[in-house]
């Protein structure tokens, strides 16, 4: 094999450029205000005619991409389901982008297709499923599951809790399925009456609602298809300590979860798993002239997102992932206790899956959030009222740090 092949300059290994990118990244890891309040987009308004060169382009973009980004790893960032990603995933993502495998074509992704299958093999037993595939998010996982339900079992209607994520209704709308929301209890947990006849119905059960992290009763219902939307809470199955919170998931026909939430992966990484994966995949399989193998699922060209995920899972093992998830659960509970000890704060309920919902008693939640300095929490609407929400997705979150900033903001509002 000749080693002195002449590659196009775009493909020559530019160590200086990568060093520059890494130096900028390193610089940006120093904690500052976790969510920049103002961003000045200093880019040209029309597409530049002439290029400025790679390093200059990165120099232009670093104030936007790095300084303009929320610091999800900040000790005071305790806000959304979006995790700070581990360094091993960055490194593997760099390889992934450099190789640019396309799962659509076996000859454009000989190893990446196998790698995804292997990752699915690692994941599926925790949910009692037979197989599945990676998708870019739980929105697509929910869609794909209901698509399979329509094709395999002929379902015509979807039932979900009134606390379910909007993607369940979105999927039903796209698929031409009737959608009905069932009232969950005051704890946001839906318990379905098993006696109702649901011959043409797919029931969507949520394991970790988006607003409060509640888990529906997951046992069998007599529906034609049961899908568990475990976008947030699904990864609890990897924890010996907390897996039982999702007992019953193994009776579902399909399960989805977002690895880009509680498995700490870069965006675009989620899984949809099926009890009868052969039937589900056959129902969404399309052959075509240019394809060597049928295209299965919603995506056409598909990235090798299994690579950063596999790197993380190999680096940590199941136990390492479970330890991080468990620490998040314990952090959320400890945070709820701290908030309860503060008389100026009301806590919505005991956190079930690492989501803490709370608000100040005497001032609107938005006032408190606006006054927070060096800390960040999210807002959530519950029955028309605005609450504050903290999610245990940041393993660097520091409870003392966040509590101190909350108290300081309350003091500042009073004075
Ligand atoms: C319960 C639930 N389902 C579905 C979704 C959508 O997931 P994604 O953002 O991965 O598409 C979310 C997002 O927060 C969610 O919480």
Image: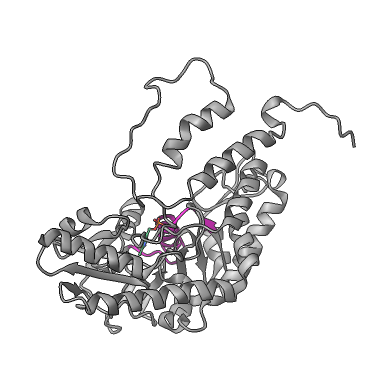
What span is in magenta? 134-156
Residue drawn at the location 48% of the way across and 46% of the way down: 28
* Ligand 1 lies in quarter: bottom left
Compared to residue 381, the image places residue 62 above or below, namely: above
In the picture as drawn, the residue positioned furthest to the top comes out as 49
> In screen coordinates, is 29 left or right of 378?
right
Q: Quadrant of residue 150?
A: bottom left
Please tell me which residue lies in front, 321 or 268.
321
Q: Whole-percent x and y of residue 307?
A: 63, 55
| The one of 373 and 376 positioned closer to us in this rendering | 373
Image quarter of the C terminus: bottom left
Q: How is the image coloured?
A: one colour
**Location of the N terminus (image quadrant):** top right
Query: Residue 141 lies in magenta, yes or no?
Result: yes
In the rendering, at what x and y percent does residue 51 appear? 54, 19
Q: Residue at x 62, y 64 (%)?
A: 119
Q: Residue furthest toward the front?
A: 415
**Left or right, residue 20 beside residue 292:** left
User: Residue 253: where, in percent of width, then height?
Assistant: 46, 72
Tell me if residue 187 can be seen.
no
Quarter of the image where one finds residue 63 = top left
Classified by dominant secondary structure, the portion drawn in magenta counts as: helix
- State the residue in front, 370 or 219: 370
Task: Report if residue 146 lies within the magenta region.
Answer: yes
How far across and how far down the image is residue 176, in percent?
32, 53
């Amino acid at each position: 094999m000749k080693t002195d092949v002449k590659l196009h300059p775009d493909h020559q290994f530019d160590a200086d450029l990568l060093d520059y990118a890494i130096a900028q990244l390193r610089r940006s890891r120093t904690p500052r205000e976790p969510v920049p309040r103002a961003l000045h987009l200093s880019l040209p308004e029309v597409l530049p005619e002439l290029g400025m060169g790679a390093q200059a382009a990165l120099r232009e973009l670093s104030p936007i991409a790095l300084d303009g980004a929320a610091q999800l790893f900040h000790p005071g960032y305790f806000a959304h389901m979006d995790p700070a990603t581990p360094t091993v995933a960055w490194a593997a993502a760099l390889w992934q982008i450099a190789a640019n495998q396309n799962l659509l074509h076996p000859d454009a992704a000989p190893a990446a297709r196998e790698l995804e299958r292997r990752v699915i093999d690692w994941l599926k037993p925790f949910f009692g499923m037979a197989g599945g595939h990676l998708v870019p998010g739980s929105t697509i996982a929910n869609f794909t599951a209901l698509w399979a339900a329509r094709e395999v079992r002929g379902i015509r209607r979807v039932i979900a809790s009134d606390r379910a994520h909007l993607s369940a209704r979105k999927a039903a709308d796209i698929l031409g399925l009737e959608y009905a929301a069932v009232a969950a209890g005051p704890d946001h947990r839906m318990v379905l009456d098993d006696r109702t006849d649901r011959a043409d119905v797919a029931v969507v059960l949520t394991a970790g609602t988006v607003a409060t992290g509640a888990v529906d009763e997951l046992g069998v219902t007599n529906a034609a298809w049961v899908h568990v939307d475990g976008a947030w809470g699904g990864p609890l199955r990897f924890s010996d300590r907390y897996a039982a919170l999702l007992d019953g998931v193994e009776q579902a026909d399909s399960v989805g979860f977002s690895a880009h939430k509680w498995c700490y992966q870069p965006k675009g990484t989620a899984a949809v798993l099926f009890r009868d994966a052969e039937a589900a995949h056959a129902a969404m399989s399309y052959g075509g002239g240019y394809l060597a193998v049928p295209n299965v699922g919603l995506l056409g060209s598909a990235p090798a997102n299994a690579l950063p995920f596999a790197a993380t899972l190999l680096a940590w093992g199941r136990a390492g992932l479970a330890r991080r998830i468990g620490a998040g659960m314990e952090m959320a509970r400890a945070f709820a206790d701290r908030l309860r000890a503060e008389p100026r704060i009301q806590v919505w309920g005991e956190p079930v899956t690492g989501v803490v919902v709370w608000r100040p008693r005497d001032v609107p939640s938005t006032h408190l959030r606006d006054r927070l300095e060096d800390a960040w929490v999210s807002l959530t609407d519950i029955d028309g009222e605005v609450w504050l929400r903290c999610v245990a997705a940041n393993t660097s979150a520091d409870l003392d740090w966040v509590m101190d900033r909350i108290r300081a903001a309350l003091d500042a509002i009073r004075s």
